[in-house]
Image: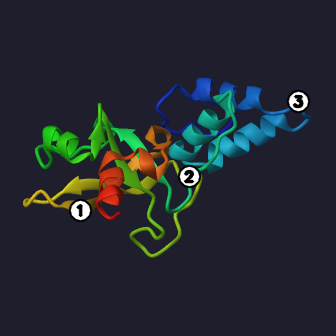
């Protein structure tokens, strides 16, 4: 049996979810044990997420615009949601950001990383647009077209 690691769901549940997602094969148990032993808990979580989805997963790539629930990232009292809403940097409970072309170490972001660096769209003390780089769980991010972000839409309209 594979060495148990700490993951957000019971080990046996994760083991069975991965096992059931694999094609019946003579080495299926060995493959599951290998994955459970060699992958970190975040990688196991993203594998299970991919196996449970009923639609094809399209990974985010650098330059993609994303939205995420404001509770997906902790910013305390640093930003006022009313100001974010007024500036078009938030719609409902969702904030916006962009996948950077390079991470904090100068590397291209990995498409299947369980957490992504995001250039979160926020404001400074003078209520001017800035970005704040944060790490957010990949499963919390949803691709959005650039024109669906009110701040960018109004900025583009002013440039005409």
Instruction: Name the residue carrying label 2.
Output: 60
| 36 relative position to 5: left or right | right
Q: Quadrant of the C terminus?
A: bottom left
Instruction: Name the residue carrying label 3.
Output: 24
Callout 2 secondary element: loop
Where is residue 37, by image quadrant?
top right
Crowd class of label 2 (few under 14; some 14 to 19; many from 20; radius 10 Å): many
Q: Position of residue 131 (x, y in %)?
A: 28, 61
> Which residue does the image show at 37% across and 52% down from the upper left?
97
Q: How many marks?
A: 3
- Above or below residue 144? Residue 92 is above
Instruction: Name the residue carrying label 1.
Output: 130
Observer-nearest residue: 108 or 12? 108
> Which residue does the image show at 45% across and 52% down from the upper left?
146
Callout 3 secondary element: loop
Q: Is residue 134 visible?
A: no
Q: Is residue 60 visible?
A: yes
For marks 1 and 2, give the one nearer the viewer. 1
Q: Quadrant of the N terminus?
A: top right
Q: Position of residue 136 (x, y in %)?
A: 39, 48
- Above or below residue 25? Residue 158 is below
Residue found at the far bottom of this picture? 106
The numbered mark, 1 or 2, whose residue comes first in the sequence reads 2
Q: Position of residue 156 (x, y in %)?
A: 35, 59
Q: CA distance from mark 1 to mark 2?
A: 22 Å
Residue found at the far front of this picture? 160
- Above or below residue 79? Residue 25 is above
> Which residue does the image show at 20% across and 48% down from the upper left?
87
The numbered mark, 2 or 3, whose residue comes first in the sequence reads 3
Callout 1 secondary element: strand
């Amino acid at each position: 049996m594979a060495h148990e690691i700490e993951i957000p769901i019971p080990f046996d549940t994760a083991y069975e979810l991965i096992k059931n997602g694999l094609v019946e094969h003579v080495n299926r148990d060995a493959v599951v044990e290998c994955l459970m032993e060699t992958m970190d808990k975040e990688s196991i979580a993203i594998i299970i997420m991919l196996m449970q989805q009923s639609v094809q997963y399209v990974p985010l790539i650098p330059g993609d615009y994303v939205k995420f629930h404001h509770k997906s990232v902790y910013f305390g009292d640093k930003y006022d949601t009313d100001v974010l809403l007024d500036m078009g940097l938030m719609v409902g409970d969702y904030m916006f950001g962009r996948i950077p072309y390079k991470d904090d170490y100068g590397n291209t972001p990995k498409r299947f990383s369980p957490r992504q660096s995001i250039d979160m769209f926020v404001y400074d003390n003078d209520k001017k647009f800035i970005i704040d780089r944060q790490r957010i769980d990949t499963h919390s991010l949803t691709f959005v077209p650039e024109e669906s972000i009110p701040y960018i839409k109004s900025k583009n309209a002013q440039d005409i």
